[in-house]
Image (spheres, rainbow, N blue to C red):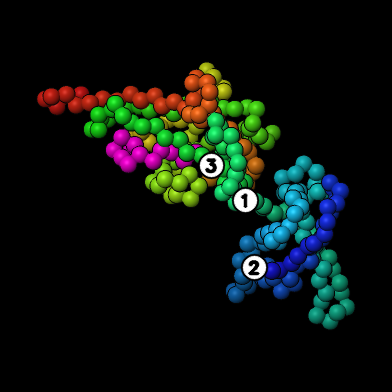
């Protein structure tokens, strides 16, 4: 532990001060030395038994007066000069363990900052095993009521990655570049469309674990954007996930 803070609930705009280990801070300032230790910052972790949920302002908050600040007070070797340096330019992120998250089974949750991810799977029955997928498109209906997107979100995009295991949270998936990106369609802004030809061809070849839906990697732990899409359990069939596939099969004689 390199610092701690303990107190009860306070006002909404209460400022707190965490005293840091001075040896650690000295290591940060040695970034140009040959034996310097990389500065990865610190993690703020609640102590076991904590009963208060406290939100702290982030580096992206509107008001500069609330931005987290590092204040370093230094004294020269002779003890004759005292100086204070203040730093407020930094990068932050947060994460959470949501293994026991209680959620609506009629919705698919994707939440940046914490592990809100979802799985979607389309059985490829009815398509011959050796068929060539010429085009495939996944369509997901967006739930505006439950979603929460920051006002700085200009490109509303989510990722669908090929799952190589059964779990939606901990399984490995193919790289984002080999998956598909979904964005609102021009014809129906409430529908997200993914170019899923690569995914569908892999599902047809098997095994078919479906796709992992998530915020794009660059923003998953750096924002709190939450996308909700209707799942296959929603009562309205028109809102359920859809996969449109165009394929060709080889005819006797070698033509398609």
Q: Which residue is mark 1?
A: 96
Residues tagged 1 and 3 counted as in contact (Cβ below 8 A): no
SS at mark 3 in the image: loop
The tag earlier along the polypeptide, 2 or 1, is: 2
- Identity of the residue drawn at 52% across and 21% down: 236
Please name the residue shown 45% across and 35% down the image: 120
Q: Quadrant of residue 79?
A: bottom right
Residue 24 in percent (x, y) is at 69, 70
**In the image: residue 217, left or right of residue 29:** left
Which mark is on residue 117?
3
Q: Check disc 2 and report its element: helix, strand or loop.
A: loop
Outermost residue to the left: 253
Q: Report x, y in % for residue 241.
A: 47, 27
Q: Quadrant of residue 196?
A: top left
Element type where label 1 sits in the image = loop
Looking at this view, is 150 or 103 the one in front?
103
Disc 2 residue crowd, few under 14, some 14–19, many 20+, Cα 10 Å: few
Q: Is residue 184 visible?
A: no
Q: Nearer the viewer, residue 46 or 74?
A: 46
* Magenta stretch in the rendered image: 202-213
Mark 1 or 3, nearer chain start? 1
Of labels 2 and 1, the one closer to you: 1
Asked if 102 appears above or below 39 in the picture, the reply is: above
Decide which of tag 3 and tag 2 comes sooner along the chain: 2
Quickly name the residue at label 2.
31
């Amino acid at each position: 532990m390199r610092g701690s803070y303990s107190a009860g609930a306070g006002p909404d705009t209460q400022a707190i001060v965490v005293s840091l280990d001075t040896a650690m801070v000295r290591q940060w300032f040695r970034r140009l030395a040959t034996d310097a230790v990389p500065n990865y910052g610190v993690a703020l972790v609640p102590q076991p038994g904590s009963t208060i949920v406290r939100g702290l302002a982030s580096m992206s908050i509107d008001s500069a007066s609330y931005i987290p600040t590092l204040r370093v007070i230094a004294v020269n070797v002779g003890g004759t000069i005292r100086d204070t340096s203040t730093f407020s330019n930094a990068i932050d992120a947060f994460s959470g363990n949501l293994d026991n998250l209680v959620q609506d089974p009629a919705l698919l949750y994707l939440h940046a900052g914490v592990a809100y991810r979802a799985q979607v799977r389309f059985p490829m029955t009815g398509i011959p095993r050796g068929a060539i997928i010429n085009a495939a498109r996944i369509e997901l209906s967006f739930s505006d009521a439950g979603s929460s997107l920051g006002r700085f979100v200009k490109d509303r995009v989510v990722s669908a990655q090929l799952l190589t295991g059964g779990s939606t949270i901990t399984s490995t998936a193919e790289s984002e570049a080999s998956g598909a990106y979904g964005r609102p369609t021009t014809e129906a802004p409430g529908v997200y469309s993914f170019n899923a030809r690569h995914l569908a061809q892999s599902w047809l070849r098997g095994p078919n674990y479906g796709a992992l839906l998530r915020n794009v990697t660059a923003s998953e732990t750096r924002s709190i954007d939450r996308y909700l899409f209707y799942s296959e359990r929603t009562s309205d069939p028109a809102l359920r996930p859809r996969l449109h596939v165009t394929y060709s099969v080889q005819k006797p004689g070698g033509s398609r």
